[in-house]
Image (cartoon, helix red, strand yellow):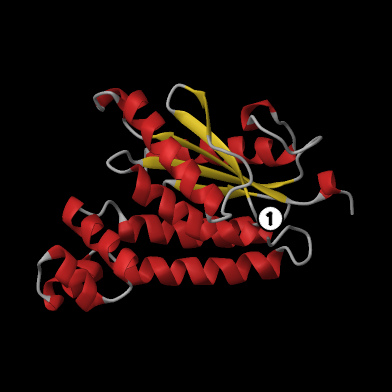
Amino acid sequence: MQDSEKLRGVVVADVVGSTRTQDARTLLGSKLRIATIVHVKEKRIQLPYAVTAGDEFQTVVRGLDQIPELLFDLRRRMRPLRLRIGVGIGVISGRLKPPVNELTGQAFEFARAAIDRAKQARARSDRSTSFQSTNQQFDLLAGLIYSLHDALVGNPSGKQWETIDAFLAKGRVDRAARSLRLNASTVSRNLSRSHFWESLETIEVMKKIINSSFPKLHDSV
């Protein structure tokens, strides 16, 4: 299979309510620069994030099984900005090189269709994540999982996100508690109320679904 024929994951995101957020474009740019450095270093994305129009940005994921954790980490790093995300899985035309906003192909078309669907759904639900791929059965399952996930997780409070950050940095509840100068029971309660454990479960389940839905058709490194 030629490189251009491999299935790629494209993420297109925009900021919900950006017109009501002061200096949204400046905040978006500064956070995307940091996210690019981290996610390239962690080998989560193939190309740097690029702002394509207004408050919208996109990237190509490095391996389809990176998508679930990338979505969670994007939402975490971009706060207080809230994201609406469309994920497209398909082929990309031509050579994969920056800037990402000059690339074309099926994966980009799918991602655009997915985020448009998320925008339409937003008026009647809390859904903020949508998928479109070459596998319709996967799209239906991923859509159902993230519809439930988005409705359950919603928008964690600042304190809850702070607790999540500390736990991810320290790796243990007691160490996170010490760094926050809180008792362990408070940290544990904040993690539970933010539905952090359910988010981790969603990530692991979606990785398995992606790998079973697109076997040997994508880069895993």
The answer to whether residue 127 is left or right of residue 40 is left
Q: Residue at x 15, y 71 (%)?
A: 178
Q: Position of residue 177 (x, y in %)?
A: 17, 71
The answer to which image quadrant residue 138 occupies is bottom right
Between 197 and 36, the one lying in front of the other is 36
Element assignment for label 1: helix
Furthest residue in direction right, as rendered: 1
Between 220 and 134, the one lying in front of the other is 220
Look at mark 1 in the image and give the residue it sits on. 136
The answer to whether residue 175 is left or right of residue 199 is left
Q: Position of residue 95 (x, y in %)?
A: 79, 36
The answer to which image quadrant residue 21 occupies is top left
For label 1, count other residues whose C-alpha is less than 10 Å away and answer few (under 14), some (14-19) or many (20+).
Answer: few
**Quadrant the C terminus occupies:** bottom right
Query: Quick check: 66 above or below 96?
Result: below
Query: Quick check: 104 above or below 139?
Result: above
Q: Residue at x 75, y 40 (%)?
A: 92
